[in-house]
Each structure stands twice: as C-alpha cells, then as structure tokens.
C-alpha cells in the first residue's frame, strides 16, 4: 500500500536520474560572502584604473607620439589612444615615433594592455563558468555528504530547530534545508546552509538532500497531513535515520508514529501549556525557555557515563541528572531502574552554558 502511494506521489521524471548540471538551481551549495555584482564592479574599477594609468603615461610622453593629422596630442587624444590600444583595436591614427615613446609603450602600455584584457576576459569567463562550477560543487557534495541533518520546512519551527542545532555546535554545512519557497531558501543559503528546492513528499527530492545517508531528519512542515506524508517518504528511503516530526494536533501523533517517526512534538499543545503556566507561574515558563535556549544560562544535554560513575546512583552526581537513557529508552531519575548506572548508559542532565 505504501509503495503504491509513493508511486502516485513521485514524478515520472526522476530527479535523481538527471545529470548534475541539470540540478543547478534545485540544489544550492553556500557561496562566499562576496556577491557577483560586487565582484563585477571590482573588476570594472580595476580596468578603469589600468586605463587611467595608460592615459597618464601617454599624456606625459605625448611629445613622442604622432597624430595622423600632424597636430599635437590633447588629453582627449591620449584617452582615445589608451582606449584603442588597451582594447587591441589599434586604428594606427596615433602612433609612437620617438625611441623613448616606443620604449614606454613596450614596458608600460603593453603590460597594461595584457592586464586590461585579463580583467575583462576573466569577468566573462567567471560568468560563463558559474554554471559549471556549481555543477562540480553539487557533484562533490552529493558524493561526500554523510551523517548530516535534513530539515524539512524553513518556517518558524524549522528555523528554530536549526538555531538549536547550531547552538549545539553542529556546523551549518552539515544541515540541509528542503522547502518549496525560494525566498525562504535564499534566507537559509545566506546562513551557510545547503538548500534543496522541492516538495519533501517526493522521494526524489529527499534523495537529492541525501536523506538516505542522513543521521537525522526533522519534519517541520505547516500541515499535519503533509508531515505524515513526508515522514512516510523519509522512513521508506532512510530506515536507519532518526526522524523527529512536529504536528499541530495531538490526535495525529499515532499517525506520525505509524509512519515511522521516532519522536513527535505537538507544537500547539506545548505552546498552550506554556501560556497557561505563564498566567500563574511565569518563572516556570522563564526557566523552560532558558533550558530550551542553548546560547546562555542552562540547557538540557546528554552525555555518556564515565567509568567511575558506573554502579552509582545518578542522584549522587555533581550534575543535575534528569534521566538515564538505556538502550534508547528514557528512564526518569525517580524510577527504581535508574538507581544504578550501567555501562553504555547515557545521562540526561542540566548543564550550564557559558558565553
């Protein structure tokens, strides 16, 4: 049944079967901070500087040049000669005739001419090879991407989830954002994130994001039905990845778990509880926000147990331990199962974050 559903959702032209150059614009690898417009203007200014230097050289030695009309060279004539000379047009109506003028033309004008052409041709080649360069980067990225995190949806939930990941020292280059809105993807790319344009309900789009090699997939769409379809698709192509999904209504939790989600966060009910607590115990809400914000104050974290902690009680440690993670299952500190720490356990504790 799931296979038939996936077949109806997938497009007939598989994105993963396309050549890499056809994926330019679908996958975007983060660029440097310099914009193309700034790079072009920089080259134009360099070319103008080379032209101005040539004009000064010719004007200073204008007595060594001969005009076809037989007159003296004006500043306009020097500009004209420098322009046609550096652009290799060379009409021959103004020529150096004295040995000194010819010497300066060899040692100064000719190098400026070569430099001028390199700047202009370099700008043209940069524009022409941009697509090829992006194709190479996409090809290399698809070959090397492993154990990364795929975030489906770059709305409020997706952006906050990514901020939390980066706050936990995960590099932006190891996070891939999938969305259909190009404007929000532009914002994600500006933060150094790899972006993929397309609907994550399509298995081809998730494969382009490397979901089959991902360590974790975060589903942060705006609709519960979309979250179910995305989770179903993601679990089908990434059976070993940890899938975390957010939904609005708790009644859809079982659908997401049946679709393959490891963890489900009910966003509306969580926000509602915090709103209710804020009216009576605002300090509790403040502490909860502090725990959920990794940048400063306190944060909930997980760490492996140390050798000298095995056999002891988590309540007697220096850290404030909230629970023990054993075989992927959370055991709260109050439970009798957590009275003794075992090898291979992980501790869920509160750590202090320093700026």
Image (cartoon, helix red, strand yellow):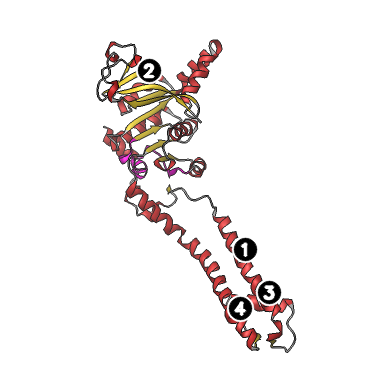
Q: CA distance from mark 4 to mark 2?
A: 78 Å
Q: CA distance from mark 4 to mark 1?
A: 18 Å
Stretch of the chain drawn in magenta: 192-215
Q: Which residue is mark 3?
A: 56
Classify residue 271 as left or right of residue 306. Answer: right
Q: Nearer the viewer, residue 69 or 287?
A: 287
* Mark 3, other Cα within 10 Å: few <14 / some 14–19 / many ≥20: some
Considering only vertical position in the picture, is 150 above or below 44? Answer: above
In contact (CB < 8 Å): disc 3 and disc 4: no
Q: Nearer the viewer, residue 320 or 31?
A: 320
In contact (CB < 8 Å): disc 3 and disc 1: no
Q: List x then y, in percent, for residue 338.
A: 29, 15
Q: CA distance from mark 3 to mark 4?
A: 14 Å
Which of marks 2 and 1 precedes in the sequence?
1
Which of marks 1 and 4 precedes in the sequence?
1
Image quarter for residue 260?
top left
Which of marks 2 and 3 precedes in the sequence?
3
Instruction: Look at discs 3 and 4 and give the one toward the viewer.
Output: 3
Considering only vertical position in the picture, is 330 above or below 164? Answer: above
Q: CA distance from mark 1 to mark 2?
A: 62 Å
In contact (CB < 8 Å): disc 4 and disc 1: no
Q: Which residue is mark 4?
A: 85
Instruction: Look at discs 1 and 2 and give the one toward the viewer.
Output: 2
Q: Is residue 323 magenta?
A: no
Q: Is residue 206 magenta?
A: yes
* Mark 1, other Cα within 10 Å: few <14 / some 14–19 / many ≥20: few
Q: Which residue is mark 2?
A: 322
User: What's the mark number on residue 45?
Assistant: 1
Instruction: Look at discs 3 and 1 and give the one toward the viewer.
Output: 3
User: What's the mark number on residue 248?
Assistant: none
Q: Is residue 14 visible?
A: no
In contact (CB < 8 Å): disc 1 and disc 2: no
């Amino acid at each position: 049944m799931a296979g038939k559903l996936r077949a109806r959702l997938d497009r007939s032209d598989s994105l993963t079967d396309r050549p890499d150059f056809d994926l330019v614009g679908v996958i975007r690898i983060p660029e440097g901070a310099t914009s193309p417009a700034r790079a072009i203007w920089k080259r134009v200014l360099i070319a103008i500087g080379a032209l101005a230097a040539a004009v000064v050289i010719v004007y200073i030695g204008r007595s060594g040049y001969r005009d076809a009309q037989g007159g003296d060279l004006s500043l306009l004539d020097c500009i004209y000669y420098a322009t046609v000379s550096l652009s290799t047009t060379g009409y021959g109506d103004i020529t150096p005739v004295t040995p000194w003028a010819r010497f300066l033309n060899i040692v100064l004008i000719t190098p400026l001419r070569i430099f001028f052409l390199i700047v202009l041709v370099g700008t043209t080649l940069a524009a022409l090879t941009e697509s090829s360069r992006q194709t190479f980067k996409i090809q290399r990225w698809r070959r090397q991407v492993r154990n990364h995190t795929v975030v489906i949806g770059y709305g409020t939930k997706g952006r906050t989830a990514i901020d939390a990941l980066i706050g936990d020292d995960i590099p932006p280059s190891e996070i891939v954002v999938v969305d259909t809105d190009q404007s929000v993807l532009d914002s994600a790319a500006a933060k150094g994130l790899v972006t993929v344009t397309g609907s994550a309900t399509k298995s081809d789009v998730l494969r382009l994001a490397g979901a089959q090699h991902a360590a974790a997939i975060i589903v942060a769409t705006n609709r519960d039905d979309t979250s179910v379809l995305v989770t179903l698709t993601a679990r089908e192509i990434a059976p070993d990845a940890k899938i975390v999904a957010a939904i609005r209504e708790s009644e859809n939790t079982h659908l997401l778990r049946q679709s393959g989600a490891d963890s489900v966060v009910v966003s509306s009910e969580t926000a509602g509880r915090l709103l209710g607590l804020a009216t009576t115990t605002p300090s509790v809400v403040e502490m909860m926000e502090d725990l959920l914000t990794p940048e400063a104050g306190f944060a909930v974290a997980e760490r492996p147990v140390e050798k000298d902690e095995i056999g002891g009680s988590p309540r007697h440690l220096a850290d404030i331990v909230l629970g023990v993670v054993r075989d992927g299952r959370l055991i709260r500190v109050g439970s009798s199962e957590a009275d003794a720490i075992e090898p291979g356990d992980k501790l869920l504790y509160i750590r202090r974050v320093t700026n």
